[in-house]
Amino acid sequence: YWGRGVVLMDPEGQVTQLWNLFDTLDPDGEDPQLEFFCEAKQDTLETHVNGLGYDPSTGDFFVSSFCLDSIRRIDGATGTLEWTFTQAWDAEFEVVAGEEILNTPHSIQVVEEGLLVFKVADHQSDGCSSGSVFQLDEEQWRAEQVSSMPSSDCIEVWGMGLAQRLPNGNTLLTLSSAGTLEEQTPDGQVVWRIEAGLGPSFGYGQRVTSLY
């Protein structure tokens, strides 16, 4: 099994493992999560933990898993698993709308409204890849998707992908396997778009203020 986890590195290069999926999951047990592991190479099972978000106000980390269709909150000081948001097995959060809202996550970012997640195939947007924002109420244990920003021509990527909230309030979508980048305003208007025409030419995109 490939569990994946979170490690911390200090300025001197000392590495400490903060959290690993198998801290709270027995790969030889009967946990329902095991049914959702992806098949990987060499007869192994993969969780495909693929996104890491950080909340500077609490010091906590948020981890997304593509195969397990889940988001987990990890205490940044102790490595304790605070909660898991998923609809694939027994859920800790009740979804407000009662429909499937979390599927195929591939990146996660803490934003003002909640958690911005890139979904490879958004079931609420006709299967288009999208950047969606979730609000998770940890007092009432309720989850709600408050916005969704699908790719402008309904691209569904088959690999990677990232949604990044920019300082100006817009969102950058990296449609990796489609070789496409686009920036959208909060109301879904495309500010600019790059189509490389090179197939899966982008991995992850990150907006920077300057190269100098």
Image (cartoon, rainbow, N blue to C red):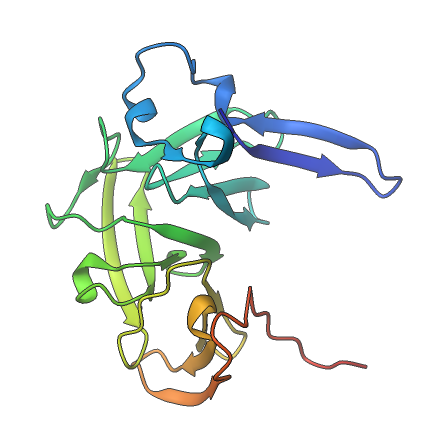
Residue 205 on image: x %, y %: 56, 70
Q: Is residue 55 above or below residue 148?
A: above
- Where does the image place residue 37, in percent across and percent down from the top left? 36, 31
Q: Position of residue 113 (x, y in %)?
A: 37, 60
Identify the residue at the far right of this view.
12
| Residue that extends furthest to the left in the rendered view of this protein | 98
Residue depicted at 43% across the width and 13% down the height: 26
Q: Which residue lies most toward the bottom here? A: 192
The answer to whether residue 72 is left or right of residue 126 is right
* Left or right: residue 184 compared with residue 20: left
Give the residue at x 54% y 72%. 201
Q: Is 146 left, or right, of 63 in this rendering?
A: left
Q: Residue at x 35, y 36 (%)?
A: 68
- Tell me if residue 130 comes above or below residue 96 in the rendering: below
Q: Taking 109 as reference, is 151 above or below it?
A: below
Q: Quadrant of residue 82?
A: top left
Give the x, y percent position of residue 21.
49, 26
Please name whichever residue, 126 or 209, is drawn nearer the observer in this view of the structure: 126
Residue lying at the far front of the rendered structure: 42
Quarter placement of the C terminus: bottom right
Residue at 39%, 56% (x, y): give it: 117
Give the quarter of the image for residue 149.
Answer: bottom left
